[in-house]
Image (tube, grey):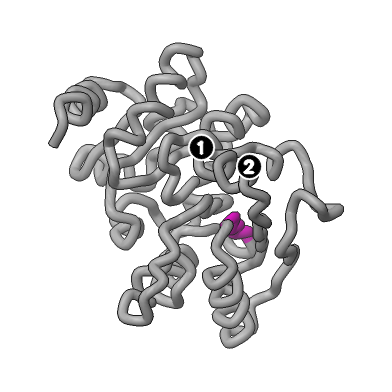
Amino acid sequence: MGKDKLRKFAEIATFENVFQKDEGKKMKGHWAQGHFGNNSPIILELACGKGEYSVNMALLFPDKNFIGVDYKGNRLWRGAKTAMEENIRNVAFLRIQIENIIDYFDEGEVSEIWITFPDPQPQKSREKKRLTAPPFLDRYKAVLAPGSPVHLKTDNDDLFTYTLEVLSAHSLPILVNTNDLYNSTFLNEVLAIKTYYERKYLTTGKNINYLKWQLL
């Protein structure tokens, strides 16, 4: 591991807005009041990378709480550092494997989930690792309040098609569906937030897919 990564791992261990492993488990059921000091809704960004969505949504919606979730601490460092430098108090970061999410959030504790440009896990043998695979949807349902939405933004057309097939197979209501977000009528100030990777994709002319659905 490079020196810069090691430095970032060491730094996030001291950040008050970053939670790891057992530290995060202690927050289960208490995120709003225990960390944010309010009763506002909790919104998760899964596979958050550098945390662009979490940080920018926190700025847009100061009356809501945002938690970026990812396992790569050197990426989380950027979002957490920005939030601290700009005194954005309604955003935090959780460094865990997403498959363990039910160990960190109580039933109905989460109001909304964003999945932003996750690893598409294209190999058939890794289908269960896709963040929109049925086992993950079951975990999301366990922590989401009834009727809460889930969002997916991805440049990967195969993951987009796969997710549509999963939602159809499980008879889950699709609220928004577009394979060309930036040329659609759905684009708004939230969907216009761009991650590091999204900017790279757009410069090559790649279409961006977007889905919004509910877990019943």
- At x 25%, y 41%, the residue is 26
Q: Does the image show residue 59?
A: yes
Residue kind at label 2, given as amino acid type = Thr
The answer to whether residue 24 is above or below residue 3 is below
For the stretch drawn in magenta, the main secondary structure is strand
Residue 129: name its quadrant.
bottom left
The answer to whether residue 195 is above or below residue 132 is above
Residue 64: name its quadrant.
top right
- At x 31%, y 80%, the residue is 125
Between 78 and 138, the residue placed more toward the observer is: 78
Q: Position of residue 208 (x, y in %)?
A: 65, 55
Bounds of the magenta span?
148-154
Q: Is 150 contained in the magenta span?
A: yes
Query: Which badge, 1 or 2, is on the more N-terminal residue?
Result: 1
Quadrant for the C terminus in the image: bottom right
- At x 55%, y 63%, the residue is 156
Q: Position of residue 174 (x, y in %)?
A: 70, 71
Work out which residue is located at the far front of the displayed protein and give it.
204
Q: Residues within 10 Å of mark 1 (few under 14, many from 20)?
A: few
- At x 86%, y 53%, the residue is 185
Q: Are marks 1 and 2 in contact (CB under 8 Å)?
A: no
Residue kind at label 1, given as amino acid type = Tyr
Which residue is under mark 2?
203
Left or right of 172? Residue 42 is left
Which residue is under mark 1?
196
Quadrant for the N terminus in the image: top left
Res 34 label: none
Between 164 and 5, the residue placed more toward the observer is: 5
Q: Residues within 10 Å of mark 2 (few under 14, many from 20)?
A: few
Left or right of 209? Residue 78 is left
Q: Position of residue 143 (x, y in %)?
A: 45, 59
